[in-house]
Image (tube, rainbow, N blue to C red):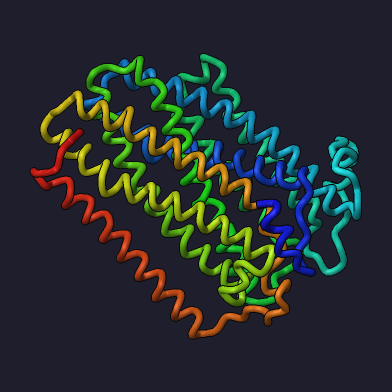
Amino acid sequence: MHHALLAADTAGYTMPQLWRVLTKAGYFIGLSGAIGATVTYATTVRPALRAPETSGQDAEVLRRRSATYLAWGGVVLLVAGYFQLAARLARAGKGMPFGDALAPDRIWDYLHAPAAKGAWIAQGTVYLVQNAVLAVTAAALIALFVPAVRRHTDAVALTALPLSVAVTLIAAVPATKPADLDRWLDLAFDQTHIISGVVWLGGLAVLVALAGTRGRLGDGAGLLWADMWRRFSLVAMVCVGAVTVSGLWLSWKHVGAVSQLWTTGYGIALLVKILLVAGLVTAGAFNQFWLMPRIAQARRADDTSSLLHLTLRHFPKVVWGEVALGLAVLVVMPFLAGSARTEAGSAKAVSSGSIFAAGAALAIALAVSLYATAKASDALSRRPAATTA
C-alpha cells in the first residue's frame, strides 16, 4: 500500500505520518467496538437470547461473553478517543510533534481555545462535548466488568447505543455554517458511511467473538445461532446498501475520472479500499447463497448436528475472513486524504438535478438487488435437493 502510493508521486498527495494512520484506524476500531457491538447486541443478540426456545444456560453464557466484549469495547474506545484527540491537536498545531500533543494541559488548552473568526462555535468546544459523551459512553460500557452491573447488560447496552452514535455525529458538527447544499450532503453521507461501516464490521467482530463460546453451549445452540445469523444478515444487508450509496457520493465528490483511481495517491488508496470492500461483499454473498440456505434446511429438518456445524464452525470461519478484510479497510482509511480531483487538477464536483436523479436511480436499483438477494436466498433454502452439510 505504502509503495503503491509513493509510486503515484502526485503533487497534491501527502503520505500520512505513522501516528496519523494508527490513531485514525484505532479510532474507527473504537467506534466499531462501541457502535457496532451495541447495535448488534440490540438487533441480533438480545432478541435471540429472549426467544422462548432459547436455553437459559446458553443465554447466560452468551450474555456474559457479550458483557465482557462490550466492557473491553469501552476500554478501546476511551484509549482510542484520547489518541485521536491528541492527533487532532497535532494536526491543528502547525507542526506540533504528536508526542507533545499527548500532554493533557495542551489538549485542555486546545479544547478551550476561542472560536475562529466567522465561526458560530469554537472547534475545541465541539470536540470537548464529543469527548465528554465519549467518556460517558466508555464509562457505561466499562462498568460491565462489575458483576452487579453485568446483570443489567441489556439496559447498559441500550443506553450506550445512542451515546456511541452521538460520539461520531457530534464530531462532525461544523464550526462554520456549510456554504451550500453539497457541503450538507457531504456531512450527511460521510456520517452515514462511517456509522453503517462500523455497524457492519463491529457486528461481524462481536459475533465471531461470541461464537468462541461454542464449547460451553448445549446441543440446541445451533437453533439459537441460526436465529442470530439470520437477524444479523438483515442488519448487514442494510449496512451494505448504506455504505454503497454513501460511498458512491463520496467517490464522485473526490474522483473526477476512472483513471484517477490509479494515477493519484487518493485514487490508489480508494481503489484498495474498494477491492477490500468487494471481498467483504463477496463473503457476504457466499453466506447468503450457500450457508444461510443450508442452515434453514437443517433447521427445518431438525438436524441438530448439521445445524451446530454450520452455525458455530463453518459460518464463523467465513466471518473471521470478513473481520480480517474489515480491519484492512480501517487501516486504509487514513490514506484517503485530500482529493483525487485536486491532485489531477480536475474541476470541483458540483451537484445538479441530473446527478440527484442518477443517484436516486442507483439507490433504487441497489434496493431492488438487495431485496432480490434476500428472496433468492430464501428460495434456495426451500430446495429439497440441497445438502445441509
Residue visible at 21% across and 55% down in the picture: 376
Q: Nearer the viewer, residue 62 or 50?
A: 62
User: In the picture, residue 294 is in which quadrant?
Assistant: top left
| Lateral position of residue 243 relative to residue 361, left or right | right
1 lies above or below 264: above
In the picture as drawn, the residue positioned furthest to the left comes out as 384
| Lateral position of residue 340 relative to residue 205, left or right | right
| Lateral position of residue 304 relative to residue 226, left or right | left
Q: Nearer the viewer, residue 201 or 285?
A: 285
Residue visible at 26% across and 20% down in the picture: 55
380 lies above or below 146: below
User: In the picture, residue 389 is in which quadrant?
Assistant: top left
Q: Nearer the viewer, residue 319 or 40?
A: 319
For the question of whether residue 91 can be seen, the reply is yes
26 lies above or below 118: above
Provide residue 233's location: percent of width, then percent of height: 34, 45
Provide residue 13's location: percent of width, then percent of height: 75, 64
Residue visible at 64% across and 35% down in the picture: 77
Provide residue 66's location: percent of width, then percent of height: 46, 26
Provide residue 266's location: percent of width, then percent of height: 67, 63
Q: Nearer the viewer, residue 309 or 250?
A: 309
Residue visible at 86% across and 47% down in the picture: 110
